[in-house]
Image (cartoon, rainbow, N blue to C red):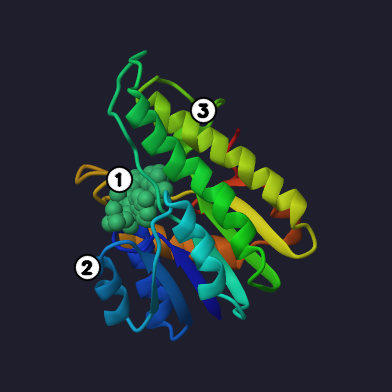
C-alpha cells in the first residue's frame, strides 16, 4: 500500500506512519521542522517538508508528490488553540492560527492530493467529536470546535466531488494521550492509530462522506 500522512512529526500522525512502515508499506509523510523530518526518515518514510499554513508550501506539495498514486491519505495536522471555557473571544491571531491550520489548509491540500490518488483511494481527515454540534455538552474550546465542524463540512464536499474516485471520511481519533490530548486522556496513541487504520481499511462505498469514531461507529453531526 502507498500511504501519505500530512502532519506526522509527532502524536497520531507519527504513529500512523510508524505502524504503516512496521507493516512494510510505502509511506510518504510530512513535517515542518528538521526534528520532525528526521523522525520520519528514521522510520524509513519518504519525508517531505510541509507547513500547512503556508500557501507556497501547500502548492509545493503538488510537484513533490507528482506521479504518486496514494491508496490512503491522512490529513492529521491540527492545533487546538485557546483553552477557553465559555464565550471568550479569541484574538485575531488565535482565530487565524486555528482556522488556517484546521480549515484553510484542508482547502488547499485536498485539491493537491486529489491529483495523486490510486483508483479507489481513501482520504481520512482527522476531525474531532468536539466538532459535533449534536453531541455537544459544553462550550469548552469553541474555536477548536468551530474549526472541526467546518472541517467536517469540507470533508462532505470532498466526498461528493471525488465520488467514484475516492472515499472520504472525517474521523474522531478518541481522546488520545499526545501533546494535544494530554497525559490524562483515555487511550494511547498506538491504540488510536491501530483502530483508525482498521476503520479506514474497512470502509465501503456507502460510508463515503461520513463522520466516524476511530472504531468505525458513526458520529452525529
Ligand atoms: P499533536 O499536538 O500531538 O500533534 C499535532 C501535529 O500537527 C504535529 O505533527 C504538528 O507539527 C502538526 N501541525 C500543527 N500545525 C502544523 C502546521 N502549520 N504545519 C504542519 N504541521 C502542523 O496532536 P495529535 O496528534 O493529538 O492530533 C492529531 C489530529 O487529531 C489533530 O488534527 C487533532 O485536532 C485531532 N484530534 C486529537 C485528539 C486527541 O485527543 N489527541 C482528539 C480529537 C482530535 P509540529 O510538530 O511541527 O508542531
User: Mark 3 sits on what residue?
Assistant: 135
* Closer to the camera in the image, 134 or 14: 14
Location of the C terminus by quadrant is top right
- Furthest toward the front, the residue is 56
Question: Dot 2: within a 10 Å radius of its alpha carbon, few (fewer than 14), some, or many (20 or more) residues?
Answer: few
Provide residue 210's location: percent of width, then percent of height.
Answer: 65, 46
Residue 186: which numbered mark, if any? 1
Provide residue 96's location: percent of width, then percent of height.
Answer: 40, 33
Question: Mark 2 against mark 3, which lies toward the viewer?
Answer: 2
Res. 113 visible in picture:
yes
* Closer to the camera in the image, 202 or 56: 56
Instruction: Confirm if mark 2 falls within 8 A of ligand 1.
Output: yes
Q: Secondary structure at mark 2?
A: helix
Indicate whether 170 appears above or below 114.
above
Q: Within the image, what quadrant is residue 65 found in?
A: bottom right
Q: Secondary structure at mark 3?
A: loop
Q: Within the image, what quadrant is residue 8 found in?
A: bottom left
User: Mark 2 sits on what residue?
Assistant: 35
Amino acid at each position: 500500500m502507498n500511504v501519505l500522512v500530512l502532519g506526522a512529526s509527532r502524536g497520531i500522525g507519527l504513529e500512523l506512519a510508524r505502524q504503516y512502515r512496521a507493516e512494510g508499506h510505502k509511506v510518504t509523510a510530512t513535517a515542518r521542522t528538521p526534528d520532525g523530518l528526521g523522525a520520519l526518515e528514521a522510520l524509513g518514510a519518504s519525508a517531505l517538508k510541509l507547513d500547512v499554513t503556508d500557501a507556497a508550501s501547500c502548492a509545493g506539495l503538488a510537484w513533490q508528490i507528482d506521479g504518486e498514486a496514494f491508496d490512503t491519505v491522512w490529513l492529521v495536522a491540527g492545533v487546538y488553540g485557546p483553552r477557553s471555557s465559555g464565550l471568550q473571544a479569541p484574538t485575531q491571531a488565535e482565530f487565524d492560527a486555528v482556522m488556517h491550520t484546521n480549515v484553510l489548509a484542508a482547502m488547499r491540500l485536498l485539491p493537491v492530493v486529489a491529483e495523486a490518488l490510486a483508483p479507489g483511494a481513501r482520504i481520512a481527515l482527522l476531525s474531532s467529536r468536539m466538532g459535533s454540534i449534536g453531541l455537544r455538552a459544553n462550550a469548552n474550546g469553541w474555536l477548536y470546535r468551530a474549526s472541526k465542524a467546518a472541517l467536517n463540512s469540507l470533508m462532505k464536499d470532498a466526498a461528493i466531488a471525488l465520488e467514484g474516485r475516492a472515499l472520504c471520511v472525517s474521523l474522531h481519533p478518541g481522546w488520545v494521550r499526545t501533546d494535544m490530548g494530554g497525559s490524562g486522556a483515555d487511550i494511547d496513541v498506538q491504540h488510536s492509530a491501530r483502530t483508525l487504520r482498521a476503520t479506514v481499511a474497512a470502509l465501503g462505498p456507502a460510508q463515503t462522506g461520513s463522520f466516524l469514531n476511530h472504531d468505525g461507529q458513526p458520529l452525529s453531526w
